[in-house]
Image: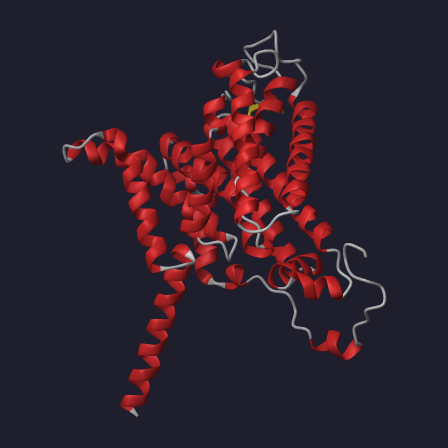
Amino acid sequence: MSLAHDSRITVRPAALAQRPARIWPEINHPAAWIVAVILVIMPLIANGFFLIEIFASTLILGTMALSLMFLAGYGGMVSLMQLTIAGFSAYMVAVFGVSGNANISLGWPWWLAVPMALALATAFGTLGGALAVRTEGIYTIMITLAIGAAFYYFTNQNWAIFNGHTGINTVATPHFWGVNWRADIPFYYIVLAVAALCYFAVEYLSRAPFGLALQGVRDNPRRMAALGFNVNAHRVAAYAFASFIAALAGVLQVWNYRQISPGSVSVGACIDVLIIAVVGGITRPIGPFIGALIFVLLRTFALDFLVRIGLDGNRFRLLIGLGFLAIVFWSSDGVIGLWQRWRQHRGADRSGGGRSHG
């Protein structure tokens, strides 16, 4: 059995001729172009705080959640170790690159440290995925959560490589072509470019033969195996692709904060990525970015809101939890599901009004 399909399975030319061309509905919609233009000109209309703390953070968290969305939405595998993979990548950037902890960091230039971090993080996620694909349902969630918890405690207690609970601080960021790429505007465009590439990669792959086969494995693995598809190979390959996306987000995260510590890879943070993906919607790649924007806005402004109304500002996660419960209660597919239901209801009202008018 191969990763694509068994060679004995043939497709008739007529069927290929009738197959519709692949399109990206999000791009064809005028609203998508409006959002794209706003994102490109954002440095002209937003100050440094909103540019980095709101929009760049949203794109980074959205990219992490995108890796989870790819596994859950197209593969039917809910992984809680995507933040762990991103954190592993961030740690590797700090260990192989330059930081304030000269006794730990090896001092490699960023153009060597980053590829090494991406390769190791992708391998780490692929190995974790190879373990997870042997299980299904709640057991997959528990195994990936156990990997995340084990990595958190390991980084918290290991001082030789990860510097224990203190973490690694003052991580160097790229400087080349005479530009400080961690400055607000250059860094924002780096984050935007990476997020866009990951988004389009997921969009394309979902319509490619591998993505269609992965969705078939999600829906009916026994039938796909009977047709000659290697079910576990597809699942492991999906973990490898999702791990690379998460690793890219981890590199951006460590450049953003210039430090990495065990708190960044805690179990609670792993669950936050799941919340982001579910709130936005796990059926379309745009969902994680919508969920990330909601999460970042609540995380940033909920504390001040609670203080103004006389409540403890540390309870801002209560608002996040209530928002999560409300969205999940009204829609099983997050904000995207609510939007689709509203459009269907609006279309039904229009058609009903048209019939009554006639």
Toward the viewer: 352 or 223? 223
Colour option used: secondary structure
Q: Which of 275 and 287 is in front in this view?
A: 275
Report whether residue 24 is seen.
yes
Question: Which residue shows up at 57% across the image and 12% down it?
Answer: 159
Residue 105 in the image: state x and y as whole percent.
62, 13
Question: Can you say whether 318 is above or below 280 in the image?
Answer: above
**Residue 194, located in which quarter of the rendered image?**
top right
Taking the spot 68% from the left edge, 37% from the top edge, the residue there is 127
Tally the numbered discs: 0
Q: Where is residue 339 in the image (x, y as percent from the top left)?
A: 38, 62
Q: Residue furthest bottom?
A: 358
Q: Which residue lies furthest to the left in this view?
A: 310
Quadrant in which the C terminus is drawn: bottom left
Q: Which residue is drawn at 81% across and 57% down?
A: 1
Q: Residue 295, located in which quarter of the rendered image?
A: top left
Mark yes or no: residue 174 visible: no
Q: In the figure, 346 relative to 29: above or below? A: below
Picture coordinates of residue 196, whole percent (x, y): 55, 46
Q: Where is residue 195 in the image (x, y as percent from the top left)?
A: 54, 43
- In this picture, residue 274 sits left or right of residue 144: left
Q: Using residue 273 as the reference point, say whether residue 161 is left or right of it.
A: right
Query: As drawn, is 111 to the left or to the right of 197?
Result: right
Q: Which residue is drawn at 52% across and 48% down?
A: 138
**Residue at the outermost right position:** 8
